Amino acid sequence: MRPSPIGPRAIVEKKKRYLIPCMYHFYRDPPQIVAGRGVRVRDSLGREYLDLYSGVSVHALGHCHPELVEAITRQAATLQHTTTIYLTQPIVDLAEALAGVLPGAIERTFFCASGSEANEGAALLAMLHTGRRRFLALQNSLHGRTKLTMNLTGLAMWRTDPYPSGDVEHVPVPHCSACPLGRSYDTCSLACVAAVEQALDRQAGSAELPAAMFVEPIQGNGGIVVPPADYLPALRAVLHRHGVLLVADEVQTGLGRTGRWFCADRWSVVPDIVTGGKALGGGTPVGYFSTTAEIAASYTRPGASTFGGNPVTATAGLTVLKVLRREGLVERAEETGAWLKGRLAELQGRQGLLREVRGEGLMVGAELGSRGELTPAQVTDEALERLKDAGVLLGKTGVDRNVLTFMPPLIVERADLEKAVNVLENVLASI
Ligand SMILES: Cc1ncc(COP(=O)(O)O)c(C=O)c1O
C-alpha cells in the first residue's frame, strides 16, 4: 500500500531542514502534487489542477502517458543501467531516431543527463573544433546551472556565481517590443545583429574571437521572447563570416513545443550544434548535444557520461519520438498554439493588465503590467496563486518575473485551454 501523503506543510518543513535553501518553490500556499494523468495533476487533498506548465516544458505527451509508462516499466524490468562502456541498443536507436528529426546534416549525438550538461558539452565541442575559448550569448538568456553554463546565462536572477568567467560576452537580445538598444524594428536594420558583427570585426585575427554563440531560438526564462524572422538567419551569416559556431539551445523549445521539431527550423536555420533535454526524456532525466559529422570529428578524445543514453531514458526518448510523430503532435502544437494566442489576444483587448502576448506553438507568454500599488511581479504572483486556487497551473518567466507562461503538454485539448483563459480572465478582473 502507498503511504499517505505527509502534506505540503510537512514537506516545506523537511525542505527547510534537509534541502539547500536555494531550492525555492512557487506559491504562498503550495499544494503537494501526488499524481498526474494527461494534462491534469492531483494534490494530497484530492484537488485536481490543469497542468499547463508541464514540469517546465517536459511532458510533451502529458503525465504518465500509458505507452511511455509501459515502455519505461518494461525496460526497467529488463535492464536499467550499464553505462556507455558496454554496448546497449536503445542509445544507438535513439541517436538514429533523433537524426531523423534534427535539422540539416546534424546527425551525431552525445547523450547526458541534463540540459546544463548538454550546453557544457556543446561548449567543449565548440572549443575543440575551433581552437578558441571564448563565447557569446544573449542578454537575459538561460543556459544552465553549472559553472560555465551559469556564466553563459544572461539572466541576473540565475547568475549566482560570485566569480564570473571573463570568457563570455553578452550581446543585445532581439526583443523588439523592449529593444535594449532603444531602436524600432521598422528602422533598425537588425541593430542587434550589427552589434555582434562590430564586436567580431574588432576581435578578428585575435585570440578574443569566440568559439561559438549560444542562442535560445525563443527565450524561455527570459520571458518567451520571439526574435523577428530575419534575426537568426542574419546572425548565423555574421557568425559564420568569422568562423564562430551557432549553438541553438533547444532545451526548452525543442521536440515540437514551438510547432516545429526544433524551433530554429521555423526560420530555416540549421545551427552548427543543437542542444536539448527536457521533453525527450518524458520525465526521465536527459540531455543531448547534436552536430554534423564534420564538427563531431573534432571530439575524439575519451568522453563519457555515466547516465547518458541509459537504457531506460533512451527507451523513454524513443517512445516520446514515436508518439509525437504518430499523433502529429508537432503540427498540432502549431495549430493549438495559434488558437491560444488568438484567445489571449482577445482577452488583452478586454483586460488592460495584459500588456503583450508572445510565443510560437505551445510556448506562449502573457506579460502583465502593474495595478494600483502592485508591481507587475506582484500582480503576476497574485495571479498565479489565484489561478492555482481555481485549478490552473501556469508558469512564470521574464526579467521582471511578470510573464505568465503557458507550456502545456502537446496533447492538450482546446477545451482545457479555453477553461484556463476563462479562469485567467476572472482572476485578472479580481486583482
Ligand atoms: C533554455 C534552457 N537551457 C538549459 C537549461 C538547463 O537545463 P537543466 O535544468 O536540465 O540542466 C534550461 C532549464 O530550464 C533551459 O530552459
Image (tube, grey):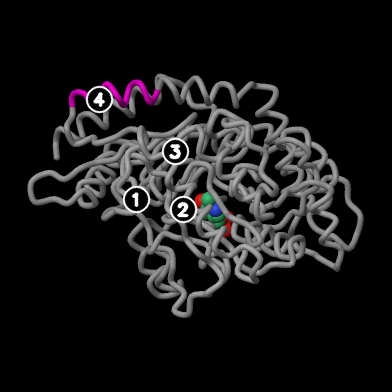
Q: From this viewpoint, is residue 47 visible?
A: no
- Residue marked by disc 1: 181
Q: Does the magenta stretch include residue 348?
A: yes
Q: From this viewpoint, is residue 79 visible?
A: yes
Name, please, the residue furthest toward the right. Answer: 87
Q: Is mark 2 on a helix, strand or loop?
A: helix
Residue 164 rendering spot, x and y as whole percentages: 48, 75
- Residue marked by disc 2: 195
Nearer the observer: mark 3 or 1; the answer is 1
- Residue marked by disc 4: 347
Nearer the observer: mark 3 or 2; the answer is 2
Q: In this view, does 202 lie to the left or right of 401?
A: right
Q: Quadrant of ligand 1?
A: bottom right
- Residue marked by disc 3: 226
Nearer the observer: mark 4 or 2; the answer is 2
Report the front residue among 174 and 37: 174
Give how far apart the Cα atoms at labels 4 and 3 are: 20 Å
Residue 265 rendering spot, x and y as whole percentages: 62, 33
Give amino acid for label 4.
Leu
| Dots 2, 1 in contact, CB < 8 A | yes
Give amino acid for label 2.
Ala
Q: Earlier in the sequence, mark 4 or mark 2?
A: 2
Residue 356 rendering spot, x and y as whole percentages: 29, 35
Task: Tell me: is circle 1 under 8 Å from ligand 1.
Answer: no
Give how far apart the Cα atoms at labels 2 and 1 are: 10 Å
Q: Which of marks 4 and 3 is nearer the N terminus?
A: 3
Report the front residue among 305 and 150: 150
